[in-house]
Amino acid sequence: MAQPQSVDVQHNGPATEAAGAGSLTSSLPTREGWWTPFFFFQGFWLTPQAVKSVTLVQARFQPRADDIILATFPKCGTTWLKALAFTLANRSRHRVIDDKHPLLTQHPQDLVPFLELPNRALHLVGELEALPSPRLLSTHLPYASLPFGVGTSSSLGCRIVYLCREPKDVVVSMWHYYKKIRPDFLIEFHKAFELFFEGFSLYGPFWEHFLGYWNQSVIDPDRVLFLKYEDMMADPTKHVKMLAEFFRVPFSEDEENAGVPEEVVKLCSFENLKGLPVNSTGKADRIGGLLMENSSFFRSGKVGDWRNHLTEEMANKLDCIVQEKLKGSGLAF
């Protein structure tokens, strides 16, 4: 596999940066197979639009000491994590048991903005600057590609929550998601599986994405909280309390006695969120130029759904590559 090229990005304003990103892709390794050619940028596969957006964010985004970043590989529970994090971080302003809670009228994806996925063609980082502190932000970026200061210095105090998921469920969820939102996504599941297995998928290789955050969580557990989707599903209340502690807003004794952690779990449950009109109807453009149904973010959410899609041979094949790539790291599935 081709190696990423080092790139110096000059901060010359949005127009100049956009043009620079365009010339950048022309020099990057590229590969076809999905709906558009992907480019190998800083060790990971991105769409042309993502390369442009990431370049702009890396050049212009200014991290703050009290930022909280929710990081995920695509289709690893991002929407659920956003709902939980928003509810926990804002419960002093929005009571969990309130018929006017923002989660009842706004899509979780809209309550926590992405760093690198603009809802317009050109990302205006100034909108992130305008957000009051502490900011709650989200990203699919690998750890090494986070904007300067976030991924390179613990002195800033910026905290990161990383949520990963069993790779066999990831590839199934990814295929269903692309098939639903992209009219130009025409590949069959077996082909998507092979590309994913090879490490060629959006923000892939997935194992490198996982390892970047895992290794940093081992080095600096106070700043990087590494979670698994399966563990959270098995005991959501335990993990809600863990997140509250990590966000520096632990539940009080009164909240514990009143069952607030359990109410957070109930409000943010997949079943509850999926059934809300704001999430089950309507469309929105969240990534720039692609109108998507709000329900696209809610399909199954079940652990082990891969058994309905993968043959035993496919499952064993993916298990083997995961074991090989994660060997010696301490991370396992």
Image: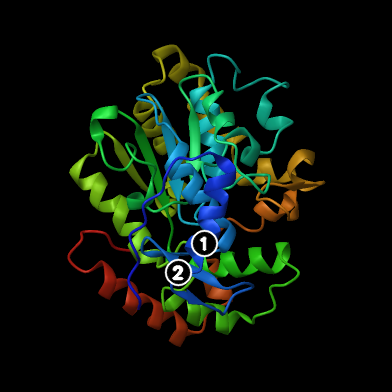
Determine whether label 2 and label 1 are within 8 Å by CB.
Answer: yes
Q: Is residue 132 shown left or right of residue 220?
A: right
Where does label 1 land, which residue? Answer: 23
Instruction: Give me the residue at 56% from left, 53% from top.
Output: 19
- In the rendered view, would you say 264 is above or below 163? above
Image quadrant of residue 244?
top left
114 or 170: nearer the viewer: 114
Q: Name the residue under label 2.
A: 27
Residue farthest along the bottom direction in this orientation: 313
Residue at (21, 59) in percent of width and height: 330
Q: Is residue 8 above or below residue 316?
A: above
Query: In the rendered structure, which amino acid carries the disc numbered 1?
Result: Ser
Q: In this view, does 224 lie to the left or right of 306?
A: left
Return the x and y of residue 327 as percentages of the image width and height.
Answer: 21, 69
For the image, the number of numbered tags is 2
Q: How far from the left and from the top, in percent, is residue 178?
A: 65, 66
